[in-house]
Amino acid sequence: MAVTDFPYQTSGEPESDPSGPRMPSVRDRMVPPMRGSRMWGWIGPLIVTVFGGIIRFINLGHPKAIVFDETYYAKDGFSLITWLVERTPVKDADKAILAGNTDIWQQCTPSNAGECAAYVVHPPLGKWMIGVGEWLFGMTPFGWRFAAAVVGTLSILILARVARRMTRSTLLGCFAGLLLALDGLHFVLSRTALLDIFLMFWVLAAFACLVVDRDRARERLVDWYETSPLSPQGPPLGLRPWRIAAGICLGAAMGVKWSGLAFAVAFALLSLLWDFGARRAASVRHPYLGAMSKDVPNGLIAFALVPFVTYMATWTGWFATALGYGRNWDQATSSGPFYFVLDSARSWVQYQWQVFTFHNGLETSHPYMSEPWSWPLLLRPVAFHYESRKGACPGATDCSEAVLGVGTPVIWFGALAALVALVVWYVATRDWRAGAVLLAYGVGWLPWFYFAFAANRTMFLFYAIPMVPFMVLAITLCAGWLIGPAVKTADGRLPARRTFGAAIVGAYALLALINFWWLHPVLSAELIPYAEWKARMLFDTRWI
C-alpha cells in the first residue's frame, strides 16, 4: 500500500458520519488513469513478444540431443500423453529416441506390473504441457521443447502488460518485456524441456491476475463511493473472476512443482492486504472489519478451494488408470465404489508423503549444484549441454558447442541494485508496487535457504527462474523513477531530469541487448572456437 492510498485520517470524524467527508480526487488516487493509447498498450508489448518468440523458436530443435534433465521430463511427458501416467523406460531409451524409435517402455506383465510404473517426484502438469508439444510435433527435440518456448514467449507478453498496468506506462511495459526476452536464463529454459519455466509462467500469470483484480476491486469501491449510500464497512465486491483466475494459476504452479505453494500463501496474504488498503483509501470507517467480513470469504474460495481443485485435477491421469506408481487400483476396486474412493485417496496421500520425504532428504552431490545465496551473483551456472569437436569450425582446431544456463549479467546485477533501491523506496513511501515485487522475489528465493542449511538439499541456479520476472519489474520501477512523470514545464518542454533519465534507461536496455548478443552462442549451442567459448565463461572455467 502506498502512502497515497490513505487520503486522510478518519479517526477524527464524528461518530454520526459513518464514513467521513467525500474526497473529489478519490478516483484518481485509487485507480490512476492509464496514459497513452489502449491500442498501443497491446501493439507495443506484442512487438516485444514477437521478438522474444522469434529468438526462442529459431533452431529450437538444436542441439539434437537430450540435454540435462530432459532425460526425465521428455520421456515423462510422452508417457503421459500415451498412458496418462509416467512409466519406466527401457535401458538406453535416450539413444533409441534420438534414433527415431519411440517403443521405449518396459513390457508389463502381472508379475512385474509394479516395475512398469515410474516413481516420479514432481506433480504431472509441467510434464503434461511438455507432452502436448510431443503430441503435436512428435518425440523430437523440437516437440519436447515446443511447450517451453510457447510459455516462455507468452510470459514476455504477460510481464509487459503487468508492468504497463503497474507503472501506467506502455513504454515501461515494453521495457520490462524486452529485458525478460533478453535474459539468458529465461532464454535457455524457454528452449529446454525442464519444469521450471512452467512454474515461472504460472506464478507470473497468477501475479498478473492479482494486479488486475486489485484495479477492478478499487474501481468497484470508487463507483460505490461516488454513487451509493456509504456504510461503515463498505460494500461487498461480488464475484471477482480475476482473483479466481489467480487461484487457478497458483494451483497450476503447484501442479508443476511444489514450490508453487509458497507463492500461493504469499499471494493470498498480499491480496488481502490490498483489500485492507483499498477500503481504507475509499474512506471506509472500518476497513479491516469490512475486508474480513466481505473479502476474506471470497479469498478463501480463490486461494484455498480453487488451487486445491486445480492441483487435484492435474492428477486425473493417475486416478483414472491402474498404471500409476502406488496406485493400487486392483485393491481399491475390490471393495466397491465407496471404498474405491477412500482407498484411492489414501494411496494418493501416501504417494505425496513419499515425494515429500524424497525432496526433504535430497542430498546427492552434483558438479553444478549451488547455494541460493550465490544465485543473484551468477557464481555457478549450469552446463546443460557441451560437446567438443575437432576442426568443425573455420579457423580453429578445437571447437565447442554449449548450452549454459546463466542469466544476462547486466540484467541480474542491475536487478541487485534495483532491489536494494526498492527496499529503501518501500520503507520511505510504502508504495504497493515495491512491496509486491519485493515479496514475490523473496518468496522465490528465501525458502531455499531453509533447504540449504536445514536439509542440505541439492539445488541449482535455474531454481531461481521464478524470481526473474520480479527482478525485471524491480528494474522497471526504478527506470520509471529515473525518467520521472510526464509533466511539461511552463514553456511546454519536458524537464531535463526526464530527458536524462530516459537516456540512462535507454543505454541500460542497449547494454542488456549487447550482453545477451555476446552470450548468445553459449546459450543456443552455436558451434564456436574453443577460445571464444572460454572467453564467455564469466567467473569460472569449470563448466564441463
Image (cartoon, helix red, strand yellow):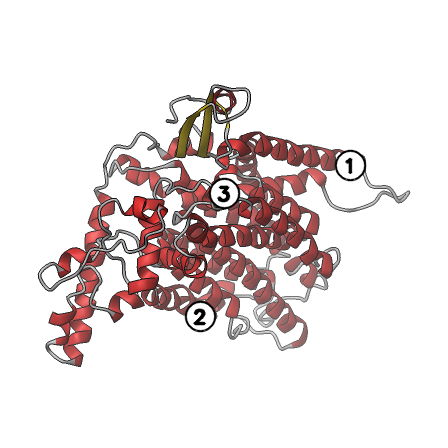
Q: Quadrant of the C terminus?
A: top left
Q: Earlier in the sequence, mark 3 or mark 1?
A: 3
**Closer-to-camera residue (80/99):** 99
* Foreground disc of the pair 1, 2: 1
Circle 3 is placed at which residue position? 186
Where does residue 252 sit, x and y in percent of width and height?
A: 40, 60
Q: Label 1: which residue? A: 499
For the question of whether residue 254 can be seen, the reply is no
Q: Position of residue 13 (x, y in %)?
A: 60, 64
Coordinates of residue 417 in the picture (x, y in percent)? 55, 32
Which residue corresponds to the image point at 48% horizontal and 35% vertical from the top-left?
525
Q: Amino acid at mark 3?
A: His
Residue 516, how many percent across, how many down?
Answer: 57, 34
Residue bearing mark 2 = 298
Q: Earlier in the sequence, mark 1 or mark 2?
A: 2
Residue 347, located in which quarter of the rendered image?
bottom left
Q: Residue at position x 53%, y 37% from top?
A: 419
For badge 2, the amino acid type reads: Asn
